[in-house]
Every structure is written in C-alpha cells, then in structure tokens.
Amino acid sequence: MAFRLREGQSGIRTRLHDLEADVMDVVWSRNLDHFAVGDVLRVLERRRDIAYTTVMTTLGRLHEKGILGRQKDGKRYVYSPRLTREEFMQDTAREVLEGLEKVSSPHAIALLAERVSSAGSDELEKLEAAIQKRREELDE
Amino acid sequence: MSEAAFPLVGTLLIFGILLPAASVASKGILWMLARLDGRGLHRFGGLRYALLVLPTAIPLAWVVSASIHQAETGASSEVCAVAHGPSEYCAEAALLALGLVLIVALAALPRIVREQLALRPSASADASSARARVLAIIDAGDSTLQRLVRAVVIKDDASEPIATFGVLSPRVVLSTGFVQKLDDGALRAALAHEAEHVRGRDPLRYFIAWWALAANPVGRWLLRAELARWILAREAHCDRDAVVSGAGPSALAHALLIAARFGLPVPQAAALGATSTEILRLRVDLLMAYAERRPTHCCREPALRLTALAILVAAVLPHQENAASALDALHTAAERAVAIFHED
C-alpha cells in the first residue's frame, strides 16, 4: 500500500482524502465489520448531501488502496475493513517517520515528549482544545 | 618498532575502517528492513536496536577480548615476533585492549555522573507536596504503576518536565511545575508511560545506543536518523502500553502536549520546531485511535537481551582455538602501515 502523505493534515486525513477519511471514520467508529454501500450512506446522509454513487465510488477506491476488502453478494458488494484504525495510524506513523528528511538529534534520555518551539504554539493550542473536548466526552 | 605503534595504529584502523564498514553494513540491513517490513510502527524493534548498537559493540568487544586472550598467555604472538624477536614478550595487544577500554569508559563516564546528579530530589515544600500527590496516584494505581513507588524523584529545577533517568537503576524525574500543571488523570497517564520506560530499562537502552554512536563518528553520521526513528517508535510503544495498563488515551495526549509546551519558549527552538510538532501530532493521533478501540499488549522484543547475546558471542569467540587470527591480521596490517610510513 503506497499513499501520498498530505501535508498539514492530521489523523487518518494524513493519507486519505476527505471523503475517504469520512467513510473510514464511519466504518471504524461504528465497528462495521461487514457492510454495504447503503450502510455507510445512511450515516453520511445525516451529516451532508451525498449521492449513493459517490459513496460507492469512494468504497471502490478504498478497496483499490487495500484498506477495504470486498465480496460479491448477489448484485452488490459487501465490504469489510482490512485494517483497524490503530493499524492504519501505525502504518501512517511509520511512513511519516521513514519519510522525514530531517530528524532532529536523538534525545539520549527517555522523555515523555520532545519540547516544541513556540512557532508551533498556535497549532498545539488547537490540538489541546480538541483533546480537552475528547477528554470531556470520554470522561477521562 | 615502538610497542605503542600497534595500539595507536590498530585503534585508528578499528575506528577508521572496521567500525565504519560495520555501520555501512548495518545501514544497508536497516534500509532493506524498512522495505521488507511493510506494516506497523513497532515491528522488529529489537532487531533495529541491535543493528544500531552492534556495529560499534561487536568489533570492540571482539578486539578487546582477542587482545586479552593474546596477552594472557604471557607469550609473544607470531606477529609480535616479527618485530620483537621470539624471546621478547610484547605487550602490544594488551595495550590495545587497555586503550580501547579507556576510550569506551571515558566516553561513558561523564554521562553517568551527570545522570546521577539529575537524580537528587528537591526538599522544598512545593516538591514535598507534589511528591505526596504523585505517590497517592501510584498507590491507587495497578501493578504497573506500583513499580514506581521507590522510583520517583521530584525536582524544582528539573531539566525536563518528566523523564526517566538512571542507567543502573531507572528513576522517573518529574518537575514540580509539571506535576502542578496536570490533573490526576493526565498525571496518572504520564506516570504509566514512564512506568513502561522503567520496565524496559530504557535509560540503559538509550545510554548504550547513545554510547555506540558517540564512540563511532562515521556510524553516528550514518545511523543517527535511524536511532531517532527507533526512539520515536519506542516512545509511541510506551504510549500504547500506558493505555493497555489503563491510562486514558486522551489524558495521555493532554500530558504529552503539556510536556511538549512546558517552559516555552525554549532556547533551542529553531532546532526543534516543525519535525517535533509533526511527531507529536502523530502520537496524539495514535492515542485518539486507542480511545476508539483499546489496544492489547504487543511487540515486547528483547532488544537488550538480543544485543547482549551478540556481544557475548563476539567476546567469547576469540577465546576459541585459532580464533584470534583476525587480530593477527589487524596487527599485521598496522605493522605494515607503520612500515610504509617509515619508508617514506
């Protein structure tokens, strides 16, 4: 599986286009093990206007990329995820690390996190706000 | 020919040719591994670690061991006899071993001393209250956290917000300010991450890897990025294990961000920046994936044991019969190099 990494994106959007990411988000967050186009369409329709054929094409693309498997079931395809979100993110992390041209000098001590420059502060504030929201949802 | 010739020229050959050649081979294997290993972040962690350390450790262990073996007989080796005559004992191999051991020790000693100094706790009221809070969280935690009961040091002036130090006996050093900034959930998650570093004896692993590259300048140039990647994968692995042991994924993500932004702006800001932000985001993304589906234990590879076994084999081999002939070849090469220099 070779993906083009998308700069400035985070999470599964680092390797997937927006609609592909939305579809996979539905699949993973709802633990859909075997599903048809209609199952995904029903969830996405609640969020936006979207055509059956658009979802069908996107699922086909995800199948070609190796993220979804599929089997014929009569006239339709039944899809199933080949990777969990964690496995997909681990692959993404590995690709990003392999592709980093300039890896900073390795810290020789076990740090929780390497400290970042003030240049990235705005972005990290947004990230922190998103994490805080997620913490409240999960009650952690 | 002076007895210092072989120890000096031999050392140059080891550090100038033998270690760089081993590092090139290691880099090649790591490159192939990256292409063969199409999946996951944590696979082959132990093998990758060994490939970072062994290009330095195996040749040095082997040469030191072979030199000791040759010197312990008390007899002059055939190669020595060429320069000194058969009846005269030559101490060249022993001097080479001594020189290499000194180089290794001198490279490591300052860091060990610095680490020991970093483990001195503060005695202020703030530090005591932070310590009491940390111990209460550890007490209420599971067996993973319990291993930190005697391994926590609180410092008002810690160089890092939270880190695990101690090559021989790992300790988690927390800055008082960092403890005060975190709520209980995030503090518990940060401690669970460090508990995995303590369990894995990571200060020792990191120290050996750091030493291997410090003693091998060409290897450092070739393998530094690989070491950085290995360390980042290891940190992500500790995040994962913290979640497996019950830490909240988003609580840990919160702690990561507080640690990353602790004491901003940092003086070395220009040196960090985009790369570390990107990596931090990746780790947060992974943690968010764990929030959806809890991970299970995986990939505990015996990095240290694998590396120690390879070094042991390298150290034992020269003590077998006729196994020191490679040292003789090195010795001969050094003598020839000196002879060529003399002829000029």
Image (cartoon, coloured by chain):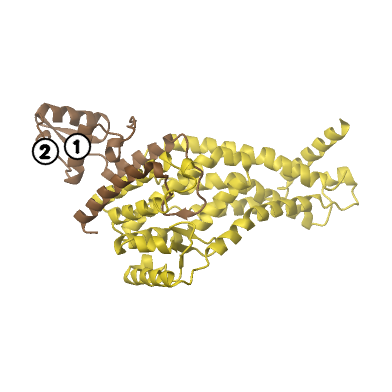
Chain colours: A brown, B yellow
Residue A109 is at least partly visible in this image: yes
- Which quarter of the figure is the C terminus of chain A placed in? bottom left
Direction from residue B140 to residue B167 in the image, left or right: right
Mark 1–mark 2 contact, CB under 8 Å? yes
Quarter of the figure with residue B182: bottom left
Q: Mark 1 vs mark 2: same chain?
A: yes
Direction from residue A129 to residue B2 in the image, left or right: right
- Looking at the image, residue A106 lies above or below residue A112: above
Q: Residue at x 11, y 40 (%)?
A: A43
Direction from residue A113 to residue A108 in the image, left or right: right
Residue B297 is at least partly visible in this image: no
Quarter of the figure with residue B279: top left
Binning the other alpha carbons within 10 Å of mark 1 as few (below 14), some (14 to 19) or many (20 upward) gives some
Q: Residue at x 31, y 42 (%)?
A: A89
Q: How far apart in space, not on screen, are marks 1 and 2 (Cα)? A: 10 Å
Does dot 1 land on a helix, a strand or a loop? Answer: helix
Amino acid carrying label 1: it is Asp
Which badge, 1 or 2, is on the more N-terminal residue? Answer: 1
Q: Position of residue A67 (x, y in %)?
A: 26, 35
Indicate which disc residue A47 carries. Answer: 2
Does dot 2 land on a helix, a strand or a loop? Answer: loop
- Looking at the image, residue B196 lies above or below residue B333: below
Q: Position of residue B96 (x, y in %)?
A: 76, 50
Residue bearing mark 1: A22
Q: Position of residue B32 (x, y in %)?
A: 48, 35
The chain holding disc 2 is A
- Which quarter of the figure is the N terminus of chain A placed in? top left
